[in-house]
Structures are given as C-alpha cells and as structure tokens.
Amino acid sequence: MNLSLYVWLAVVAIVQLIAAAIEYNAIRNHVNGANGLFLFTAGVLSVVSLPVGGVIIWFLEGWHFALVGVALVGCSAALLFYGLLKALDRRARSAKQSG
C-alpha cells in the first residue's frame, strides 16, 4: 500500500478520535447539550474526504488503487464512527442512570 493512503486513513481516524474525546469529556462533566455535534461533524468531514482523497490517490497511483483506497478508508471510517457512537451512547446512558 502507498504511504499517502496510510496518512489519509490516519488523519480520518485521528479527527474522529479527537471528536469522540471532546464528546466523552462533555458527557463525563454532565454538560447540558452534549449532543454529539463534534462527532457528527467529524463523520461529515470523513465522508467529504473520500472524493478528495480519491482524486489525490488517483493522480499519484492510478484509478484502481484510488478505488481500493476510497473503499478501504470509507469502510474503516464508517466502522470507527459507528463504534464511537455506540460507546458514547453507552457512556451517556450509564451517566444518566447514575445521577
């Protein structure tokens, strides 16, 4: 695999993890209105990066590799987003029940 693909995947993951950390901190501190806006924005940015990253990889490596890269990053970003969303939801529900 190409280094640019790994960098793209890492940037998407880091953006989502930072957003999840912000949301987790808001849930932990019982911030009223901790509604997932940062995580939602990170998810939208991940989706917006797909065509941009695909075009960059296409120019660097060719369209076959770009297609594989977009599929790989898209599926990875979606799975990470879903996992973070479920984990934060569990944490919010447990924080709500405990007081």
Image (tube, rainbow, N blue to C red):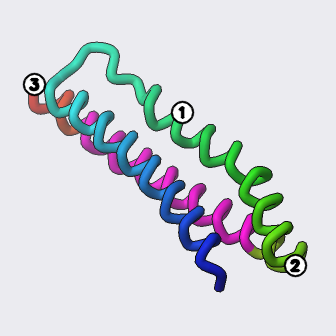
Q: Which amino acid, mark 1?
A: Thr
Q: Which of pointers 3 and 2 indicates the residue nearer the eye? A: 2
Q: Which residues are magenta?
A: 69-93
Marked residue nearer the N-terminal end (2 or 1):
1
Residue bearing mark 2 = 64
Q: Which of pointers 3 and 1 indicates the residue nearer the eye? A: 1
Please identify the residue farthest to the left as the structure is shown.
99
Q: Position of residue 19 (x, y in %)?
A: 39, 40
Q: CA distance from mark 3 to mark 2?
A: 53 Å
Q: Position of residue 32 (x, y in %)?
A: 26, 14
Q: Which amino acid, mark 2?
A: His
- Residue 99's label in the rendered image is 3
Vertical relation: 94 (above or below) 63: above
Which residue: 45% across, 48% down? 16
Q: Quadrant of residue 98?
A: top left
Q: CA distance from mark 3 to mark 1?
A: 28 Å
Q: Position of residue 63 (x, y in %)?
A: 89, 73
Which residue: 33% across, 15% down? 33
Q: Which amino acid, mark 3?
A: Gly
Q: Are marks 3 and 2 in contact (CB under 8 Å)?
A: no
